[in-house]
Amino acid sequence: MVIKKIARIIVTLQDTEPVIWRKLLVRTDTTFYKLHRILQVAMGWTNSHLFEFNLEGFRLGELVDEDDPFEDDYGPSKVLDARKTTLQELLSGQGDQCQYIYDFGDHWVHLIELETFEDEIPDTKYPVCLDGERRCPPEDCGGVHGFSELLNVLSDKKRPEYADYKRWLPRNYKPEILDLSAVNKKLLKFAR
């Protein structure tokens, strides 16, 4: 019997107060593209924007043309194909970290830390979200600063913009509540 490895990772949405985070169990043969899709569900995003992973000089994302170098402020660099690169290829030990950036406009930066490797438990479906705190910000709210302003407005019903924010937000949006069972139910579509 082959024992497959599972990565226990902690994902923290940077610069949020109070901190928004998730603890997940993910198979190590998961591609970074699939991890992106898993994180969309676990964090509560809607997969409406581009993404990128950064790890010790490696950049991973969706490639349009594998031979076309990506240009940024630091010059040309090759981006690895997130659909072909697995976690086990780049994460090797406890404490390894990478960055996950979602939505280049709002620029949501997540720190992913490998807590440990574990043996797969037979008859267990992976991925699974073990724990976490708070609901993620709504899409297109203006990044960390816009989200902070949104929370300030929601804390005071007398503010003139309160009614507009409530109409704009997803129905029954409660930033302090994470529904783990709903997250894990949605994660089942990635289970194998």
Image: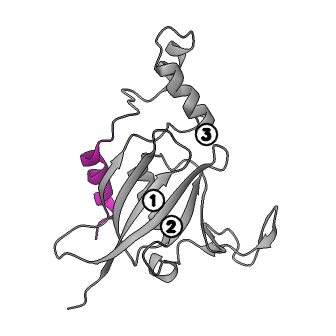
| Label 2: which secondary element | helix
- The image shows residue 154 at horizontal and vertical percentages of 47, 21
Which residue lies at the image location 41% right of the left edge and 33% below the top edge?
Answer: 175
Q: Do labels 1 and 2 touch, CB within 8 Å?
A: yes
For residue 5, above or below residue 153: below
Per the image, the residue denoted by label 2 is 33
Q: Is residue 101 magenta?
A: no
| Predominant secondary structure, magenta span | helix
Mark sitting earlier along the chain (3/2): 2
Per the image, the residue denoted by label 3 is 143
Please state which of the two labelled residues, at mark 1 or mark 3, is closer to the viewer.
Answer: 3
- Residue 170 is tagged as none
Q: Distance from label 3 to label 2 (Cα)?
A: 23 Å
| Label 1: which secondary element | helix
Instruction: Magenta stretch: give its range.
Output: 178-192
Q: What residue type is labelled 2?
A: Tyr
Per the image, the residue denoted by label 1 is 37
Dot 1 crowding, Cα within 10 Å, few <14, some 14–19, many 20+: some
| Label 3: which secondary element | helix
Which residue lies at the image location 62% right of the left edge and 35% below the top edge?
Answer: 145
